[in-house]
Amino acid sequence: MTQTILNVENLSKTFSTKNSQIDVVRDVNFEVNRGEIFGFLGPNGAGKTTTMGMLTTQIRPTSGEIILAEKSIWGNLTDTRKRISIVTQHNNLDRGLTARENLLFHARYFNLPSDEAAKRADRFLDLMDLTERADDRVVNFSGGMAQRLKIARALMHDPDILFLDEPTTGLDPQSRVLLWEEIKKLNAQGTTIFLTTHYMEEPEQLCDRVAILHEGQLKALNTPEELKKLVPGQNVVSVRTGDVRDELLSEAKTLPEVEDATAEMGTLRFYMKDATPDLGELVKWLRSQDVNILSMNLHLSTLNDVFVHLTGKGLEQR
Ligand SMILES: Nc1ncnc2c1ncn2[C@@H]1O[C@H](COP(=O)(O)OP(=O)(O)OP(=O)(O)O)[C@@H](O)[C@H]1O
């Protein structure tokens, strides 16, 4: 049976600056199930880090409630902080210590007996593929290794839920894929994971469910497969062109094969009705409209298409 570990109810955060107030998170509601990988997807500035800050007791909400395992997170902060763990975007490892020393130091902070700490350090170094580098100083680690070590450290006190803030930002593609594999392994061993990301591939690869955040509001929440069904036709033709005129878009929407059309940053997107659309007809029409086609591709809908469909903007766009 599905068990809820985290309930977020009517969560809002307004920051006050000198001249104005900014509503960064606006009445957000969701639940995270025990054992799942829950993704929080949105472009830069959507409010993901602020939400994570509230879920991990680092930022006080303006209003709303956060319940972890049936208790308000604000009731007993020491207890809450034992039950959660967060891996932030900053490299806050002690670079002068070895990988293993970083883990043992963290364990001391949580008062773990030293034999238990040593066992756990071995286990998590192994899980994160760092055993061979366990006694090397962190100063020599690559970005991917440092990120894996931060996750190993976060596991040392056996949290109920692990928060990962944009875990693969700044990593090269190979390290990103490796980290995805480590996260999957970790989840297969029972760890509940909440992760924020602005990469659409990440939740497609990793997450059981994904919440889509735009300008502080939750736009949709479901499995990646169900979210993709929100895109009409589920087949998308993207045409990159320098020139996207308003009248072009409204005419595109009336084409017989086209269910819907959007434009963002010099790219026209045609949501096709048919699974095997006649691209020749589309090209003919684009030429008749004097559209300069820089590139064109047909793909099954992605989470970026879902985002564009819901917000009119791409994930790369603010
Ligand atoms: N302490 C603060 N005071 C004022 N504004 C803030 C503060 N913290 C964040 N913001 C603003 O809130 C908005 C959302 O920021 P947040 O970092 O939560 O977004 P994000 O989705 O995590 O994006 P990113 O990936 O860029 O971190 C941004 O416009 C940011 O400038």
Image (cartoon, helix red, strand yellow):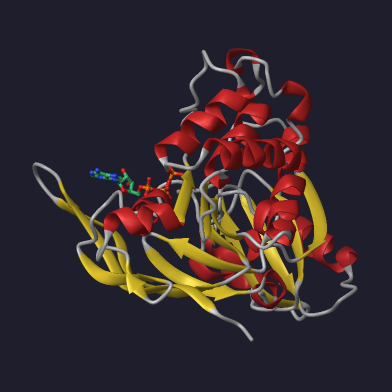
- Identified at 46% across, 62% down, the residue is 213
> Residue 163 in the image: x percent, y percent?
50, 52
Relative to 56, is 117 above or below? above
Horizontally, residue 47 falls left or right of residue 148, namely left
- Quarter where residue 149 is shown: top right
Q: Is residue 151 visible?
A: no
In the rendered image, is residue 236 in sight? yes
For image coordinates 72% across by 59% down, the residue present is 189
Query: Please, which residue is most extreme toward the left here?
Result: 18
For residue 282, which quarter of the picture? bottom right
List x then y, in percent, for residue 157: 51, 47
Quadrant showing the N terminus? bottom right
Q: How many marks?
A: 0
Q: Residue at x 24, y 60 (%)?
A: 61
- Furthest residue in direction bottom, as rendered: 1
- Give the camera-side residue of 8 and 74: 74
Q: Is residue 180 left or right of residue 304?
A: right
Task: Tell me the residue at 69%/50% (across/down).
Answer: 183
Residue nearer the viewer, 310 or 174: 174
Q: 293 above or below 299? A: above
Residue 41 placement (x, y as % from top left):
54, 58
